[in-house]
Image (cartoon, grey):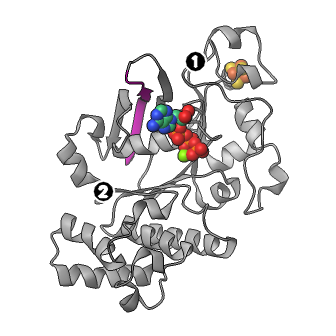
């Protein structure tokens, strides 16, 4: 029997709706994805494609204008969309944790590092104060913070950017969550620290069997860190599947454009290739395929009818009429053999 994934998103949609209800931004639109325990999923896509909104949706920490308007978030078999706020407070930090792009946004300048690392342990694991501070020192050591005994008594402004990022990582893993969502966690780090931090996350993942979701603009990081990949465009996942299969043969024209300069893929700084044209306004999506105005392969049908998500074999999914033709060809071939 196939094992149930740790996380399964089913047709998840989150829209930002203006106070008057007149402007609806479809930031996350019918997203379906799954992730097994211990695996890493990379999420890539241009700025504004809905990656952060998707992450915030999974933890249900959305700003007031955002509303989950459809779909399910099945985590360990339970639908998080249907959970009460009190239940979500229990789940956040303990079973699912998140590392934000800007470490200062996650750290309170008024509290010591020790307080902030120890607090979730006290709350979620009902651990006495002294024991949770011991754990905090151990965690700081685990994320390679020098002299943790001294550092626990210091404040965020007394740390370097790299240290702050690692402290946020320590808070993220403090209650040994099953899933850690990291939204652009290395953007503020220099190259050496970035490499160290990624290695550290991998070590922690192996040690604790963590599932990781990695949101990034950096394809080198995807190649190094991720097993699965989801490519977002205009609020939708336009292609998903294993990293190696997508890198070897991208099925969606947008993915192909992003991976445009594959020869440099080993380059740890390799960023997404710029694509001519602008992404659409998510409050006024074009009829048909959202990528059609920029797609070199668009045909008439693409401008009239949006492609659904086609399963194209090997656990891969692509939202493109041409990907469906690839699939049809394969099916035909398989049928002919
Ligand atoms: N509070 C908000 N109110 C209204 N619209 C918002 C709000 N936050 C984000 N959006 C819109 O939702 C869309 C998705 O934004 P999101 O931040 O999820 O994108 P992203 O893929 O994370 O981008 P980036 O790569 O720049 O971080 C964008 O069109 C953005 O303008
Ligand atoms: S459906 Fe058409 S426009 Fe959209 S990506 Fe595929 S070929 Fe391009
Ligand atoms: Mg973002």
How crowded is the residue under tag 1: few (<14 C-alpha within 10 Å), some, or many (20+)?
Answer: few
Q: Magenta residues, as a range?
A: 6-19
Does the image show residue 332? no
The quarter of the image holding the N terminus is top left
Disc with the residue nearer the chain's start (1 vs 2): 2
Question: Whole-Å distance between the Cαs marked 1 and 2?
Answer: 37 Å
x and y percentages locating residue 163 in the rendered image: 51, 76
Of labels 1 and 2, the one closer to you: 1
- Figure check: 235 above or below 128: above
Give the image quarter of residue 295.
top right
- Figure check: 40 above or below 285: below
Residue 145 is one of the magenta-drawn residues: no
How many numbered dots are placed on residues in this image? 2
Q: Which mark is residue 284?
A: 1
Q: Looking at the image, which residue is at 80% across and 21% down?
A: 297
x and y percentages locating residue 94 in the rendered image: 28, 60
Q: Left or right: 171 with respect to 224?
A: left
Q: Which mark is residue 95?
A: 2
Q: Main secondary structure of the magenta part?
A: strand
Tell me the SS state at disc 1: loop
Q: Looking at the image, which residue is at 41% across and 44% down?
A: 56
Does the image show residue 87? yes
Give the image quarter of residue 184.
bottom right
Q: Is mark 1 within 8 Å of ligand 1?
A: no
How crowded is the residue under tag 2: few (<14 C-alpha within 10 Å), some, or many (20+)?
Answer: some
Tell me the SS state at disc 2: loop
Residue 13 is one of the magenta-drawn residues: yes
């Amino acid at each position: 029997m196939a094992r149930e994934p740790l996380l399964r998103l089913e047709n998840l949609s989150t829209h930002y709706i203006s106070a008057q209800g007149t402007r609806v931004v479809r930031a996350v639109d019918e997203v379906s994805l799954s992730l097994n325990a211990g695996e890493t999923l990379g999420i890539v896509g241009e700025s504004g494609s809905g990656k952060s909104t998707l992450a915030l949706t999974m933890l249900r920490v959305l700003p007031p204008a955002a509303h989950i308007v459809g779909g399910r978030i099945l985590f360990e078999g339970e639908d998080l969309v249907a959970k009460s706020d009190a239940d979500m407070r229990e789940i956040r930090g303990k079973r699912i944790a998140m590392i934000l792009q800007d470490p200062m946004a996650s750290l309170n300048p008024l509290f010591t590092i020790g307080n902030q690392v120890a607090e979730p342990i006290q709350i979620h694991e009902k651990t006495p104060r002294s024991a949770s501070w011991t754990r905090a020192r151990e965690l700081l050591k685990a994320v390679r913070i020098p002299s943790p005994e001294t550092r626990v008594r210091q404040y965020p402004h007394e740390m370097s950017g790299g240290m702050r990022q690692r402290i946020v990582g320590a808070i993220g893993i403090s209650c040994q969550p099953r899933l850690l969502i990291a939204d652009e966690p290395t953007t503020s780090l220099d190259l050496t620290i970035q490499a160290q931090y990624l290695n550290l996350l991998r070590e922690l993942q192996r040690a604790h069997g963590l599932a990781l979701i990695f949101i990034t603009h950096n394809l080198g990081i995807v190649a190094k860190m991720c097993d699965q990949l989801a490519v977002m465009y205009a609020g939708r996942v336009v292609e998903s599947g294993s990293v190696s299969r997508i890198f070897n043969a991208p099925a969606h024209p947008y993915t192909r454009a992003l991976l445009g300069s594959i020869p440099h893929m080993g380059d740890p700084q390799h960023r997404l290739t710029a694509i001519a044209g602008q992404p659409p306004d998510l409050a006024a999506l074009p009829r048909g395929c959202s990528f059609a105005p920029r797609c070199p392969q668009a045909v008439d049908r693409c401008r009239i009818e949006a492609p659904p998500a086609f399963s194209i074999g090997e656990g891969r999914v692509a939202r493109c009429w041409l990907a469906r033709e690839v699939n049809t060809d394969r099916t035909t071939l398989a049928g002919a053999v």
